[in-house]
Amino acid sequence: MSEDFTVPEKSGAEILIDTLIEQGVDTVFGYPGGAVLPIYDALFQHTKIRHVLVRHEAGAAHAAEGYARSTGKPGVVLVTSGPGATNAVTGIADAFMDSIPLIVLTGQVATNLIGSDAFQEADTVGITRHCSKHNYLVKDPADLASTVREAFAIATKGRPGPVVIDIPKNVQVATASTDVKRATSSRFNPAGEADYAEINRAVELLANAKAPILYTGGGIINSGPDASAALRELAELCGAPVTSTLMGLGAYPASGDAWLGMLGMHGTYEANMAMNQCDVMLCLGARFDDRVTGRLDAFSPDSIKIHIDIDRSSINKTVRVDLPIVADVGAAIRQMIEVWKGRKYKAAALDDWWARIKGWRAVDCLSYAGSTQEIMPQYAIERLFAATKDKAPIITTEVGQHQMWAAQHFHFDAPNKWLTSGGLGTMGYGLPAAVGAQMGNPDALVIDIAGEASIQMNIQEMATATQYRLPVKVFILNNEWMGMVRQWQELTYESRFSESYSDSLPDFVALAEAYGWKGIRCSDPAKLDDAIAEMLAYKGPVMFDCRVHKTSNCFPMIPSGAAHTDMILHSDEVSGTMDDEAKALV
Amino acid sequence: MHIKQELTERHVLTLTVDNEAGTLARIAGMFTSRGYNIDSLTVADISEDHTTSRITIVTRGPPPVIDQIIAQCERLIPVHKVTDLTEAGPHVERELALVKVRGTGDQRVEAMRLADIYRARVIDATVNSFIFEITGGPDKIDTFVALMREVGLVEVGRTGIVGLMRGAEGS
């Protein structure tokens, strides 16, 4: 006698889609292929998930990053086995370095074929093991739902990051009971609030500092908009100047009084001098990257350093700190505000400190030689900023000089508006990231500030923008050089410009038109404002070929292996070579 | 320009980890990818329900690197707990080795005599060979193996170190 158990069974592909919907996924960036056909078939029958067909899997991963960073929600990628997965690896590594929450679903050959060098087989979990926060190979459809749920928790909680789920084709087809309720894992417990003893000590140090500085990073953006609001309140309470890493731009408004500009290799003179001379440094969700610290033994030698980070491995990794605090940075700043107010601290008299900062600001480190003949790249960014600042644009970038000029001359007043590849430094990031950001923010003005070399690395994504009618703008600072490579060769290799000239460039206007975009070219500074206005007025996607001065260098610059106090300013004579110690540094 | 070397310390770390596919690769690969050293590594299932394994890693590095190694291990999702036995205080370390020697006459007698002194047990014998089983700290085993080289060592297999804290408490 059999009892009538009508446990519904579904295929792995259907379970996957159901679980994605349950997790709130509305957009997936992907590219089909043999090993994910069952998932694509299941997707075909659902209307709740929009699938964005990219033109290369690297584009899918970067688009998902752009979506995640601009919306605060995890980005989802769906690619096939073998080359689909390996093409996505750069984006996964990029998301890992910059702590971006991604769920990357990869097809895999059937379980019985794994290890047999089957068609389009690659060891995806092996390849992505050390460039993802976690990864899985799912061998049973009954495990899919719980795996996906845990993956979303891991990707989004604590320090965010990419999680890869590799799903063999037979697991997508095989069925399993859908009422399997496996105990959800409790093995992942990220830090939350800080210990009050540590917070008290941090507040005490900050309140008694004579030359404090807030050194902020991408952790504040990742902690959510509340963390940015809290940072502004804390800065107001303590009166300290604020600087930020490349990743943290927008957490504190660039229009705020306490803003020093970005720090680090291409940061401002005032930010780097203040970091060097401060007596208390409060590092909030940043990680003392080598691009930030310069020469380590000369990094802020006399300061007491407080470091708040959700990832314990970021603390004391390169710079020893005096007060490490493992906590969610947003929660910890709130706690600091609570303690500050509770103890009725007053902002210390920082007049002397601000007077020194004023002296450094007077150096006017971002100034450059203007021209009426040619468009200076800095000028182009300034004019783009002036034309768009009231439209709350989302800016993405590629990697190189244009990226640093954008960070210096475009100013951000809100978080989640600045999407750039910081840690990995991935050329080709900006266009797909803009596609993803525009998908997540249909009404926003999204601009990819690009270089003529970088843009060619994922230029195929122009078709994606065309297909989904995404009005992204690509603003190319075209100087016909891989500018940052050229700059380093000029400064460290006696101007031996080995392979850094962008030869055989396409006609970007004709290319734009070929993809159904509008193309604009401008090389006259007098006509630049009108050309930018034309770009902004156009409803669809625009590629703007901005012909700029060809050999401008990006200053200020801390040369490789130098201290914060040894910045090169635009007016300095720079020597043409460096010793081996400096050359060996990144 | 020359590459600079740093002074290192030896540390014994124990990790409690989920017993699932890929965990060992994740940990061993993290050591490789971040440039950390592994002197020895042992892993075995230690739980009744086969869900948990214990890994013992002997590593080397300057103190800040050891600290970073522990933090990087803790950051991995399947790793539940990391204990630095070297830092935590008195502990015992043991390793097992199987040592095969071949020889006849005086050489064979000498091998047997040394094995006796080192409390190695004979677990296989032929007319011209022995396999000895020896347990102890790494120094003792190193010394024993060095002695066996003089009397006909054929091959040696070592388990790597396992360790526990002394006293009644778990780590």
Image (cartoon, coloured by chain):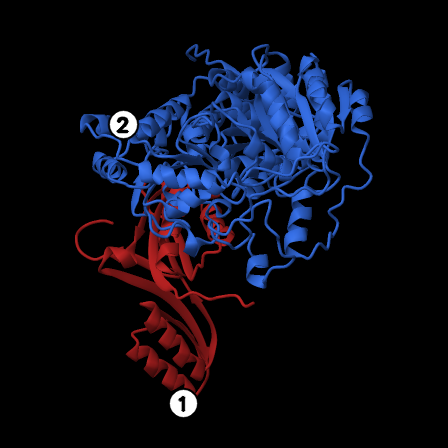
Q: Nearer the viewer, residue A286 or B7?
A: A286
Find residue A255 and report its horizontal and vertical position in percent. Answer: 46, 25
**Closest to the observer, A345 or A165:** A345
Residue B85: % across, % down = 28, 56
Image-based side of A188 in relation to A475, left or right: left
Rendered residue at 62%/52% (across/down): A573
Question: What residue is drawn where x is 31% and y is 63%?
Answer: B94
Q: Relative to residue A158, is residue A440 drawn left or right?
A: right
Name the residue located 47 percent from the left edge and 46 percent from the top edge: B26
Q: Are marks 1 and 2 in contact (CB under 8 Å)?
A: no
| Mark 1 lies on residue | B106
* Amino acid found under the numbered disc labelled 1: Asp
Q: Position of residue A303 (x, y in %)?
A: 33, 48
Tell me which amino acid carries mark 2. Answer: Ile
Quarter of image, res B135:
bottom left
Chain A takes which shade in the image? Answer: blue
- Marks 1 and 2: which is nearer the front? 2
**Which tint was used for chain B?**
red
Give the residue number, with chain letter if any, for mark 2.
Answer: A337
